Image (tube, rainbow, N blue to C red):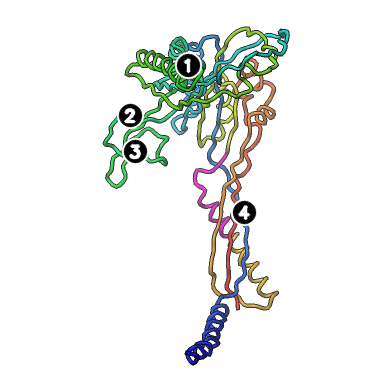
Amino acid sequence: MSCKIFAALSAMPILLSLQVAAFAQTTASAPKTIDVTGHGDSSAKPDLMALSFAVTTRSDSADECTRKESETSQRVVSALKATLGDSAKVSTADFSFNPNIEYGNGNATPTPSTMRAEEPPATWEFKADVNVFADSMQPLGDLIETGLAAGATSVGQSGISQMPDEQDATAPAVPRALVGSASTYSNGGVAYQRLKRMYYISLSVVAQGTSPPDSFRKGTVVVDRVEAALKKQIGARGRVEVTDFAVTEINPQQRPGFSQYQPPPPPQPQRKVYDAQMTVSAETPKLELLGPTVEAAVKAGAARLNQVSFTLKDDSSARKEAIEKASADAKAKAETLASSMGVKLKEILRISTNAQARPYVVYGNQYLGGMSSGVASMHSGSVSSPQQAQMPVTPREVSFSADVNVTYQIE
């Protein structure tokens, strides 16, 4: 047995020698490299202009507010199409609707701290959202009043959503990348559902109770009532669904029974008003019509010009030029570095690039600052002549930058 142990120990240096040799061979075979980064810039004269306008409405009535917002937005869209012609692409987006309260200036007398003799059970709160979708903005005002009258406590989010036009359970889901345009899609012969634009308002329901079941029971009664009222009014023109319900315990510091300082109540409200806003955008190759386009939109009811962006319809030439310059810069750097270090360049092992266009953007306040006083007077109620509404600045060239990262093998 001792002979076997001796033989095993005698073989160990040989095994270790083989492993060290293999490691040395692997290390020696790893290529020597250098990494360089090249940068290139190019520019081109812009041939595409994108304008963004804000249309805002304020009214004492929710129905009147949504009606005015719809009418004004349509007037702005029609004015843009008439000014820019068939070559322009005009669209609306980012609709929002919010109730607000205008307060007075009076301040109430602060209420002193209070102490309860006994702490009652913890208070629980139920919250749920009831969303109503309509095929236009017109019925939203009446739907809000109906929901609040049925027990909803407040108006939450609002906006525009894309929804399937036909409720077909057998149709595949619409891919996320395709959401945004109302059309029917196919992929390899598989049909997808048609999408349509829907306007929605979210109504919140809040109910409190002495326990989770108590608050839940109270809340669901109100939710059912609000949902039924909205469904009855919207009918086949839309849909109603309940989302995001929860039951939570109120903060212990807010429970009755704790010593609490009652802050002064807010000033008494003067009136409740409703605000609506929508973005109207236009895209056109007619850069020379910037001044008349802004004038037409403001005259039709646009509240302000958000921004003007000058870019390229096709940036392939500018991209190619920037990448070629970046590649030449990387190669020159590699050759200089190799020469200074006394090594030779061999083949390229890795290469990557990142190219990005930089549109020229003029914001609304910059545009108005460069316009004549006659054009700026459009915002005070008067509209200047087309001769005064000239583009205040000549759009600069659109820049394009590229970076190329290269790994060279050297010897």
SS assignment at label 1: helix
N-terminal of the two: label 1 or label 2? 1
* Quadrant of residue 326 within the rendered picture: bottom right
Q: Which mark is residue 41?
A: 4
Overall secondary structure of the magenta stretch?
helix
Count the marks: how many? 4
Residue 70 x %, y %? 47, 18
Q: Residue at x 57, y 80 (%)?
A: 28
Query: Relative to 236, does residue 90 appear above or below in the rendering?
Result: below
Mark 1 surroundings: few (<14), some (14-19) or many (≥20) residues within 10 A: few
Residue under pointer 2: 165
Residue 344 x %, y %? 62, 77
CA separation in Å, label 2 and label 4 = 46 Å
Residue under pointer 1: 71
Residue type pointed to by label 4:
Asp
CA separation in Å, label 3 and label 4 = 42 Å
Q: Is residue 314 magenta?
A: yes
Residue 164 x %, y %? 34, 31
Q: Nearer the viewer, mark 3 or mark 1?
A: 3
Q: Residue at x 47, y 22 (%)?
A: 202
Between 297 and 126, the one nearer to me in the picture: 126
Q: Nearer the viewer, mark 4 or mark 1?
A: 1
Residue type pointed to by label 3:
Ala
Q: Which residues are magenta?
A: 310-325
Specify whether residue 267 is in view.
Answer: yes
* Quadrant of residue 336 within the rendered picture: bottom right
Q: Residue at x 36, y 21 (%)?
A: 238
N-terminal of the two: label 2 or label 4? 4
Mark 4 surroundings: few (<14), some (14-19) or many (≥20) residues within 10 A: many
Between 376 and 214, the one nearer to me in the picture: 214
Residue under pointer 3: 173
Does residue 8 appear left or right of residue 226 in this picture? Answer: right
